[in-house]
Structures are given as structure tokens and as C-alpha cells.
Amino acid sequence: MAASAGPEIERLIALLAKLPGLGPRSARRAALQLLKKRDQLLVPLAAAMTEAAEKVVACSVCGTPDTRDPCAICSDPARDDGLICVVEEAGALWAMERSGAFRGRYHVMGGLLSALDGVGPDQLRVAELVGRVKGTGAREVVLALPATVDGQTTAHYLAERLSGSGVEITSLARGVPVGGDLDWLDDGTIVQALRARRPA
Amino acid sequence: MAASAGPEIERLIALLAKLPGLGPRSARRAALQLLKKRDQLLVPLAAAMTEAAEKVVACSVCGTPDTRDPCAICSDPARDDGLICVVEEAGALWAMERSGAFRGRYHVMGGLLSALDGVGPDQLRVAELVGRVKGTGAREVVLALPATVDGQTTAHYLAERLSGSGVEITSLARGVPVGGDLDWLDDGTIVQALRARRPA
């Protein structure tokens, strides 16, 4: 690709290109920026990555990456043990936390069931969820999984696996997002928002 | 933002968000991917960055980042010393090298003159270029700068600074890109392609 850049820079570009959101071209731009801002960006980022690799582990209870195990949320005594929110990845957990509306515990699946990508229940943290719900006697499991085919397949599978354990299974409401203009919404969302309409 | 993620992860996300092409949201996704693929991605990338920070320097002749000084291109005896291609950044140099059409030397400006961003000639490698052209008695300087306002301002400034040194100053041709459909080209390019039309 760029023989003149030397193997070290080529390796850096190749690894950066594996990050989501960066392709080969933007990875080259990112590498150049890093090399140009050596002391402000490259050195601190290398240190932050090394530190993260050394210190961050998946929480043994919920699966969130954190430097503590159990993580900050799992070890917070003020949270509701009876309420478990199931998310695909920690990114969704962080979004829930930013909303400030949820004060229960979480369970990170680590992905979604996918026939296409060959992801089965064994690759996800399903057994851990079932064991946790039974062990803690949780009252409600909120499925906060993506509104995609894989997300809904996973939600149905989990609902089935948890049925019989006496736990109430709910999922996030579908509807028009706050600030959402009907003109720009897909038909599926409008159909669901209409079906779930409520007294104004 | 995500108090529960811990300061180490927050710091990693904040630094990743400074890379070109990544915003706060994609930086979170990148951080999650890194933490998820700890051994395949996070550890190797941290090592590649540390190695680059230690080994890569700007070539003292042309300004390209390389592990050698002078860089591989500047120390290649097979290249034409009389021909210097001026580029904004090493990314443009890599693109020229991929084309395989240029066998001269390079000079990396390290940016463009910009009234808006307050970039003057002192922040760029202008004096180095002038000294190099006079010192080596180069025959031709090819200005391969972007076809933007800042790129052309810089090109005009460099042409003026180099006038009187006896060097021929050229710039890359403007025209329809290979595979370019006229329907999708901007008017400025069409005007320039028409003015520079050649016998078929």
C-alpha cells in the first residue's frame, strides 16, 4: 500500500483500520494525526490503551467492562436488585445510565443471536442470565435489546428461556422518538406507535 | 457521560474521540470493540502505538514520518534529485507513491497556509523547502497541493517564494478524474477540464 511508510506505520494503520467507524483511508488519516501529535495524542493514547488492557475486566456478575469486579453498578447498594435490564453491549448500558431513568442492575449479553453470523446461545451470556434470575429471585427483567431482527430474535429466545422462573419480562416501549418528525420515521415505527397509542 | 464506565475507560474514549473520523459516539463504539477484543486488538494496537511513538521521526530532509532519518525515499539513490514534489501531508505522499508514477523526491509542508486557522509560513516547512531547492539546485518543483482555497493560496505563496531561484514550478493537471462521470462533477472541474482540453 505505502511501502515507503515503513512496517511500523503500516502495522499501526492496519490495526487502526480494524476499529469500527474507520476504514483503510481514515485509518491512514488517523495514523498521520497520531504521528503529528505525538506528545499530545499518540503517547497518551498508547498509555491509556495499555492501562485499559491491564486494568479493565468484564464484571463477573453483569459483564460490563470496568476496573473493578464486581463493577461499580453491581456493587452499588442503592440499586434495585429485583430489576435487571438486559442489553446487547456496554454501549447500550452507558446510554441507559445517561438517561438517568433506570436504577436497577444490568446484564450485558455480549452480542445477539444471529443465524447469519453463526452466533448461538453458547457464545452469549445466556446461562449467566438464567442462573442470575433464578439465584437472586429477580422480580422483573427489562429486555432493552435493539429493534432489529437479531435483537428481537434474541429477546424472544430469552423470554422463552426465562419463562417458568416466575420473573416478569418486559421490553422497552416502541414509538415516536422525542423530537421525532413523522415525515422522517419509517413505517414500522409509525405502525407500532399507532398500535400502542395512549390517551393524551 | 458514563460515570459507571470508570475513569480509565472514559479517558480512552476521550482520546479516541480526538482521532479524525471518530466522534464521541463512534469513540465509545471503538473503545468497546477494543475492550472486547483485548488480545486481538487492544494489546497489539497499544504496542504498535508505543513502538511508533518511540521509533518514528519526521525525516530531517523531507518531513515524512519514518523510522529512518533520512527516510527511505530520501536515502534511495535511484530517485531523481532534480525533481521535488511538494505535498501537504504524508498521506498525499503515500497516494503519489501508490500511483507509481513519480520517481523524484518529496517535501512535506506539514499543513497549508490558512488565514482562518491562523497558520502562517513560519508554522510550515517553507524555509526548509526554499533552502533545499537552492542547496540542491533542483530543476523542477511539482506543487501537488489540494485544489482548495488554502491549497491554492499555499501554492501561490510557494511559487512566489521560489521565483528567482531558477527552478521550474509546475502543478498537477486539473481535469475529469479517471472513471469520472460528468454528471457528478462540479462545474469548476468541468470548466478547468474544458480550458485545458487536448487533441484526442
Image (tube, coloured by chain):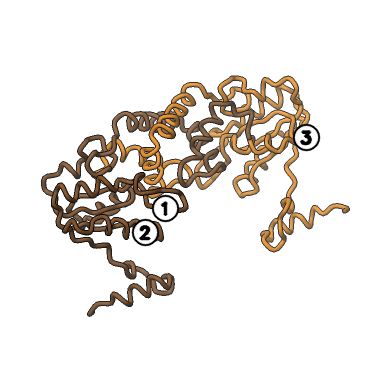
Chain colours: A orange, B brown
Indicate the quadrant where residue A190 lies: bottom right
Say what amino acid the circle numbered 2 marks.
Answer: Thr
* Residue at the image position 59 percent from the left and 24 percent from the top: A59
Q: Which residue is mark 3?
A: A168
Name the N-terminal-most of marks 1 and 2: 1
Q: Which mark is residue B35?
A: none
**What is the quadrant of the N terminus of chain B in the image?**
top right
Label 3's element? strand
Task: Estimate the spatial distance between the alpha carbons at disc 1 and disc 2, rounded to whole Å.
Answer: 8 Å
User: Dot 1, how many residues are within 10 Å of its Cα: few (below 14), some (14-19), or many (20+)?
Assistant: some
Frontmost residue, A75 versus A39: A39
Contact, mark 2 vs mark 3 (Cβ under 8 Å): no
- A127 above or below B83? above
Indicate the quadrant where residue B51 lies: top left
Q: Chain of mark 1?
A: B
Q: Which residue is mark 1?
A: B114
Please state if A94 lies on the left or on the right of A30 as rendered.
Answer: right
- A145 above or below B138? above
Label 2's element? helix
**Residue found at the very far bottom of the displayed protein:** B199
* Residue at the image position 73 percent from the left and 29 percent from the top: A104
Q: Which residue is mark 2?
A: B153
Contact, mark 1 vs mark 2 (Cβ under 8 Å): yes
